[in-house]
Amino acid sequence: MSDRAQRISIWFFIGILLFIYGILICGTGIYELFVPPEHPVVLAQLRPAIWWGGLLLLLGAFYCYHFAPGRSK
Amino acid sequence: MLNFLFQRPLLMAGMPARLFSLSSVDLLIIILYFCFVLGIGFYLKKFTRTGEDFFLAGREMTAWIAGLSFLSANLGSLELMGWAGASYQYGILAAHWYWIGAIPAMLFLGIVMMPFYYISKTHSVPGYLKLRFGEPARALSAVSFGFMTVLMSGINMYAMALVMKVVLGWNIYFSIWVSSLTVAIYVALGGLLSAILNEVLQFILIWAGSLLIPVIGLIEAGGWHNMVQRISHNLGGADYTHMWRTMGSFTDNPMGIHWTGIVFGLGWVISFGYWTTDFLVVQRVLSAKDMRSAQLAPIIGSAFKMMVPFIVILPGLLGLALLPMKLLPEAQAIATGGHSYNEVLPIMLARYCGPGLLGLGITALIAGFMSGMAGNVSAFATVWTYDIYRPFLKKVKSDQHFVTVGRWCTILGVLASIGTAYLVMHFASIMDYVQALFSFFIAPLFGTVLLGMLWKRATPAGGFWGLLAGTLSSIGMWAWVWIDPTALKYIALSTHARDMAENMYRALWSWIVCVIVTVVVSLITKPKEDKELEGLVYGLTKLPSSSHLPLYKRPMFWAAVVAGVFVVLQIIFW
């Protein structure tokens, strides 16, 4: 088997990082639902941390699954 | 580096209190990023055994990886912040550096020039000059590239540390050492492979951390149309949202530039010089696994490059439309303790991003800096090892020896960059000359490489003397204006021309000098035999055909698509 075939895809690493970032950011957004910050940012009512964090989480999960070692070529 | 034109003022930013503080979740996000890039470097070390692995990533990158890395190496954080500031200052005119100043050149690299670089199997651009014109042309090009790369890398490093100080209040030495040593470690371990794969990660993070600003900004502004109206209202009816209609005269636009300077200076010489001959970016494409991937990589890069104004130029325009305070020129910001144009991106970041998202945004800036720096040091290590050390110092050594030299070069390159950063810290006036210094080499090199690839009659003597004459003429023009500022009306065709316009025209003249000298000297000297030029020159190289491929797999098809979108964008924002 060649080195390239043995190597874990960079997209898998990206998936892990995005997944963790998604959990942290989305989690922070949910926490702020219950404990509103003292100085909210502009348009905080749009809850960007929740949906952006959620998007990163989903994207990360997809990359982790699709490029998992052993699954990708 | 092309876009360093706007980065210099960033260094002169006033030093008010930090813009914002980070929460623990923000810090965790930043620390995780550092852990990941280092971890990837350690992981890839075992896959980096030969010179081909270390210096060309094994020539096994897919078109997507090479293309994203190609763009990421150019997307430094100072580029992001500097151009956002430029768009606040000059409006949408700043997008010229992303569109006409990049797209045609990137497509030209993919379709016309890449086959010669790839087929010649060169390790570097100076290496191509060696094959085409001989050792003197290679030596001149390699030494100037090495010198400029270290200098630019150090200046970028210092600028980034200063930004971190202004934005976050971080200690300047801490920022310099932590970020640059991280880059040194992961590039020294995994070579170009590690640099490229981390650049892809960094590319994703840059977008993930920056994309939210224009999205929420447009929501706040009520859409593009309302944003344009607000800008017009805030600026007393001045036109900041059209790209070409104010270009008819030097005095009609805030850049003090004429369309000829943008089209011929930026769009032709500087852009083509940077994107087709600067080894920092070309090296990424040379790592592609086959010719088709090598051709597609710059085309993929150009498609994303065309979108970068969305995360860089638009935040500046949104700042003009939405910010309650007026950002100031540098001198005024320093005098009054206010915020300068160049802080518009972090200000918009702080406006919309709370804990977590703020950490992601700062990570995007750090990722941008590190991708640019990794590009510099990996290119420096290759040129030093293959184009200076091997031919002039140690001709015959094992492949493993050169890998070791490459690793040490990476570390020494970073240390030299840190030294430059300290030098700039104490002699800030160096910054005034860096853009000019860099432009001395770009335009003539483009003339030399272009003639070398497309004109088989160009001789080794013609290539060398053309390159030297172009470089010296550029230095001479710069010195003339420095000694006698009234000479600007000859060099830049107008006394109203600003620094940027002067750079554009000087590049154009030096390119013309290079081409003329190369042609004249070539015509009176003996050319190489045709058989020596096979694989190096148009007409003597068997170029691969993609006619057997379905349309959607052909590089030319995708280049045409990108070119079409490029034209449409010019019309929309005319």
Image (cartoon, coloured by chain):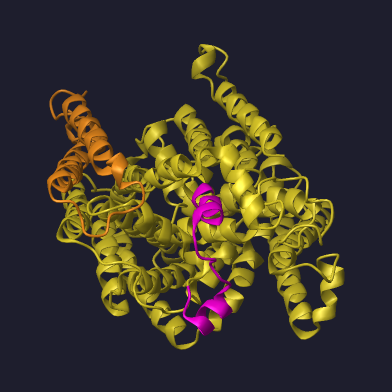
Which residue occupies the foreground of this view, B317 or B203?
Answer: B317
Q: Residue at x 17, y 28 (%)?
A: A1
Q: Is residue B512 above or below residue B148?
A: above
Relative placement, left or right, of B325 versus A28 is right
Point out residue B546 in the picture as x, y percentages from the top left corner. 55, 18
Give the chain coloured orange: A
Which residue occupies the foreground of this view, B366 or B72?
Answer: B366
Which residue occupies the foreground of this view, A56 or B88?
Answer: B88
Residue B330 forms part of the magenta stretch: yes
Point out residue B122 in the picture as x, y percentages from the top left corner. 49, 46
Q: Residue at x 84, y 79 (%)?
A: B486
Relative placement, left or right, of B220 versus B89 is left
Dominant secondary structure, magenta: helix
Q: Is residue B322 above or below residue B558?
A: below
Relative placement, left or right, of B74 versus B378 is right
Give the quadrant of the C terminus of chain B. top right
Residue B542 seen by the camera: no
Give the chain coloured yellow: B
Span highlighted in magenta in the image: B314-338
